[in-house]
Amino acid sequence: MTLKEIENEIKNCKTCRKDKKGLPVPGEGPSDAGAMFIGMAPGKKESETGRPFVGRAGKFLNEMLESIGINREDVYITSPVKYYPGDRNLRKEEIRHGAEHLKKQIEVLSPELVVLMGDVAAEAVFPEKDIKVTEDHGKTYRKEGTTYFVTFHPAAGMRFPKIRKMMKKDFQKIASLA
Ligand code: URA
């Protein structure tokens, strides 16, 4: 399977769309990206454009990437949940379902580094580990030749100065891994 085929599969997936709004947001980035950044779920702006991280959290993510010399266009950016859920908490089964598409994206891309931004991304990739970003941010995990790095979600870093400070330190580590 190619990345494009998986993106099309997501666009046509009725389970992904159930109880959610707007355009599908499968993810974007080059098919030879060495690093992948995974968030939570599209927001309103993303649901209007079909592109990941184009709202305020996206702007913050772009700045964080730039600060460590990474160009957003060079990495693959996505989320486990592929549609805007609106203003509500995600259900476990929605994360579990999105994770099936996400795992295929990781497998095909086979990046050296995957950055898990927030509890939902960590839950999607490592449901058995009970990772909590407040405790486990800055840690790396190895799986099938890929390094997984845990940090905060950009929306949290954007809102809370204390988290932003920790996230900046985490991104310095990412710079040495990417
Ligand atoms: N937050 C996410 O987790 N993903 C997006 O695409 C946008 C905001």
Image (tube, rainbow, N blue to C red):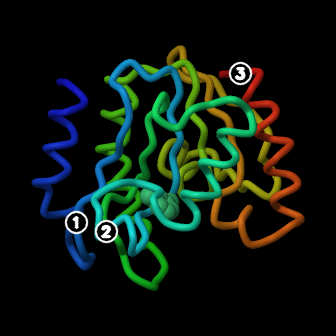
Residue at x-position 36% and y-position 25%: 107
142 relative to 163 in the view: left or right: left
Mark carried by residue 177: 3
Mark 3 CB lies closer than 8 A to ligand 1:
no
Q: Residue furthest top?
A: 145
Q: Indicate the secondary structure of the residue bearing disc 2.
A: helix
Mark 2 / mark 3, whichever is N-terminal: 2
| Distance Cα–Cα, label 2 vs label 1 | 5 Å
In front of the other: 110 or 92: 110
| Distance Cα–Cα, label 2 vs label 3 | 31 Å
In front of the other: 123 or 46: 46
Instruction: State whether residue 110 is above or below residue 137.
Output: above
Q: Name the residue under label 1.
A: 23
Quadrant of the rendering where the N terminus is positioned: top left
Q: Mark 2 points at which residue?
A: 47
Mark 2 / mark 1, whichever is N-terminal: 1
